[in-house]
Amino acid sequence: MSLPQIDPITAAIMQLAERLTCVESQATPLEEVAGCVLAEPLCADRDSPPLNVSAMDGYALRMADAARSSTLPIAQTAMAGWPAPDLPAGAAVRIFTGAPVPDQADCVIPRELTIESPAEVQLNVPVGDLKPGMNIRMRGENALGGSPILPKGTWLSSAAMSAVASVAGPTVMVHRPVRVAILNTGDELIAPGQPVQPWQIRDSNGPTLLAALGRHPWIEVISRARVNDTLEGVVSALRSCEQADAILLTGGVSMGDTDHVPAAIADIGGEIVFHRLPIRPGKPVLGAVRIMSAGPLTKERTQLIIGLPGNPVSVAVTASAISLPLLKCLAGIHDLLPNQPRVMISRADTKQLNLQWYRLVQLTTDGQAEYVDNRGSGDLISLAKSVGYVKLPTGASGAGPWELTLW
């Protein structure tokens, strides 16, 4: 049986991912693990729910008692946070949502289907409509004790934390954050907000990457620096980032006389796994790995080095499409390239490229998207107007639907 074909961009990402080792794991207090990545499967420490509980406010009773009389005395009240009371024969128990159901009860009648008085309740529902387990959340219906809840490699989102808080102990094994260093190369760069000469530009790539990485709590940016366009300067900057698990560079990866990143990576003992991919924008993107030697107190580890092109649209797109999956690999996240939602393009054109094309889009009020007018990979104004990009496979055109990635 032939294996499914994958595109060259996915193949390049997976080839480099296979060379990486994820960061260390550590037992972390439960209240500090939100946004981290599980290093071990999370299993339920008990049944969920741990006992039968009421799904609504009402009255717990025996169906057999309701068949004999539509009016039942109220014996006791069941409250959330307290043990279930006993249910005497021929009676009902007033019960609130989340409260334990008495062992003797087999259904709960919503209070809106009753006529209530202080001492008794009249059932205003045909007996034939009653079903065993009606309005009861049964013990273990969500999960049985010891069963897997979340797999290793899960990012602990706010939704996932609901399960962690319910079934985990005081500590959880998670991977520490991925430490990232950002290097922006270019003699022409000036700090944002500062006066500039016509031949200079304010550095937009550094803030773009800071904002992109800052959305992911499992990433820690440990440094950011601007680097001059000399081989010695780039080598020195790379050597200064030895504590980083990943280095993201912008600029210096093309074929010009001042593009020193490939040579600098070789100088520090890194190995380039891919350089120049069939994509637009961002074709010069480079991916490399460096083996970091073990020390007296540290194990051998890998350092990811990604060389992004210098133009702002290329930086934003390749940081999302190329860098992020590889950073996920370091973090221990298993789903490196998740399926993305698809969107149709309104007023689509027939343009196509012999490359994988990431085209900037805005969303429209009718649930579709439209292309942002773009003057090229240096057009940071069009980038600022976009909400993300769609991915057009090689040679594709038309309305789609195409995969949509939001910034």
Image: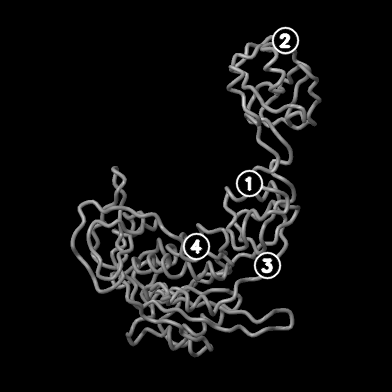
Residue 123 horizontal side relative to residue 235, left or right = right
- What's the distance in space between the residues labelled 4 and 2, CA to CA? 60 Å
- In contact (CB < 8 Å): disc 4 and disc 1: no
The residue nearer to you, when weighing 164 against 34, is: 164
Element at label 3: strand
* Amino acid identity at mark 4: Leu
Read off the residue under disc 1.
Answer: 162
Read off the residue under disc 2.
Answer: 118
Label located before the other in sequence (1 or 2):
2
- The residue mark sitting in front, 4 or 1, is 1
- The residue mark sitting in front, 4 or 2, is 2
- What's the distance in space between the residues labelled 2 and 3, CA to CA? 57 Å
Read off the residue under disc 4.
Answer: 213
- Which mark, residue 25? 3
The relative height of residue 342 versus residue 304 in the rendered view (above or below) is above
Element at label 4: helix
Colour mode of the rendering: one colour
* Amino acid identity at mark 1: Ser
Element at label 2: loop
- What's the distance in space between the residues labelled 1 and 2, CA to CA? 37 Å
* Amino acid identity at mark 3: Ser
The residue nearer to you, when weighing 125 against 143, is: 125
Q: Residues within 10 Å of mark 4 (few under 14, many from 20)?
A: some
- The residue mark sitting in front, 3 or 1, is 1
- Residue 317, image x and y in percent? 37, 66
